[in-house]
Image (spheres, coloured by chain):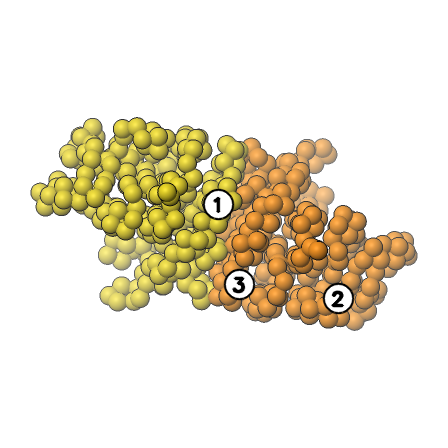
Chain colours: A yellow, B orange
Amino acid sequence: MKEELIVVKIGGNVIDDAAALDRFLSDFSQIKHKKILVHGGGKIATEIGAKLGLETVMVEGRRVTDKPTLDVVTMVYGGLINKNIVAKLQALNTNAIGLSGADGNSILCNKRPVKKVDYGFVGDVENVDETVLGHFIAGGFIPVMAPLSHDGKGNMLNINADTVATTLAKAMAKIYKVSLLYCFELQGVLSDFEDKNSVIAKMDFKHYQQLKNEGIISKGMIPKLDNSFDAIENGVEKVVICHSEDVLKVAQNSKAGTVLSK
Amino acid sequence: MKEELIVVKIGGNVIDDAAALDRFLSDFSQIKHKKILVHGGGKIATEIGAKLGLETVMVEGRRVTDKPTLDVVTMVYGGLINKNIVAKLQALNTNAIGLSGADGNSILCNKRPVKKVDYGFVGDVENVDETVLGHFIAGGFIPVMAPLSHDGKGNMLNINADTVATTLAKAMAKIYKVSLLYCFELQGVLSDFEDKNSVIAKMDFKHYQQLKNEGIISKGMIPKLDNSFDAIENGVEKVVICHSEDVLKVAQNSKAGTVLSK
């Protein structure tokens, strides 16, 4: 029987709030299972970019990663945020190692092809090598993944943290029984966006399609949910969308967030 | 019999010169032995710090790492430089993983105690765990170490890259037959600082003491040589001080640089 592995993703709202991050890391460190943490970027990269005189270039609502921006996200995501999370986890007796997809070639990407828009140094995942993180986890280490990877030609690339979490979870499912926890600033998927307590406790794919067709699922949630059901379709045992404050509860199978299943 | 491991240290002069770095990494990738790369910082951190409005604070000729400076070196050494070296090595089919001493708790440091001078967030090595890098190397990975570590209390610390190389080499000597290669901008230790061809081919400790007493060794070389002989005294098989362009030659036991021995 496969051993359990929990892949947890935290976004910018936790990264940007020192107290929330400390609380989250304390909870994460108490999860007894084998585990991986994937972190997003937060606002620090934009702030540092602005101080360095970079302008944020947006095309059709999406950020373009030109070379100076790539350098800033490589510094901030791969250095400042990643290493500080590692140091904090080490202080909590959690033997973290901070990595990007370039490290060990765990995630190989292609630079996104230029079609209508040139997004710059942004990666689309080509291959995830599950044996790389598998080796680290087997050694007792807890990988902490920054939303960065490489193109195999010597260039770093910026990748979406949700994509990192999903593709890693799918790949790790080859060797582990994987649960994927998307932590964010809400209690779960809401049936009424105005009512933060209207959390949908459980959702299968059919139910999701129905809610989507009825316009009940908010637009912003759709990519996350599409990713989640794709993960479930590809071997991930369970996906839970929950508040970052509930990570330990969810890891312990207590009721919290929205639990997705086939 | 212990397997061979080569620990190579490169300094800022290689980091700051894109062509020299590419050449070095190409040579490094061709070294057949198990290996570790330790890199220094270069001028980029100072340049980025200046753009961010930080002043470099020097006390008695040494840089003080206040909190904003620590953030900049964590970004630049641990993110920008480290991850770009990893991506470049990956493109050369070298399965690099970029790490700091915080990752895996491979190097635990103490924040330097304040005596006459407060150097800020600077680390003195307390413990190196050779099993951590040992696990990565056994898995076929090539660790690329940034000159950063942590204090075990949640803080990153700035550490001297020469110190990282020496302490790692000494610790790894418990499980490997270690050669330590200090690569820099000269052909080796010179007997006449004015004459770049006056390389001393071999030096043992007695010879070093003699040359030091005679004032032949330049002041700047003394800490590097003291570190080197300390490494040899503590289990490192061989230390070579050489030009970064000679790294492959030295790894292949061809004559280059200054070879230090007991």
At which x and y percent is residue B12? 62, 58
Q: What distance separates the C-alpha of mark 2 from that of mark 3?
A: 25 Å
Q: Nearer the viewer, mark 1 or mark 3?
A: 1
The answer to whether marks 1 and 3 sit on the same chain is no
Instruction: Please give the name of the residue rendered at 14% of the width and 44% of the height, measured from the top-left corner.
Output: A206
At which x and y percent is residue B224? 75, 53
Q: Are marks 1 and 2 in contact (CB under 8 Å)?
A: no
Parent chain of label 2: B
**Which quarter of the image is occupied by the N terminus of chain A?**
top left
Q: Which mark is residue B94?
A: 3
Q: What distance separates the C-alpha of mark 1 from that of mark 2?
A: 40 Å
Q: Is residue B8 visible?
A: yes
Please tell me which residue lies in front, B254 or A154: B254
Please tell me which residue lies in front, A75 or B118: A75
Please tell me which residue lies in front, B14 or A98: A98
At which x and y percent is residue B122? 63, 41
- In terms of image quadrants, where is residue A240? top left
Tag 3: amino acid: Thr
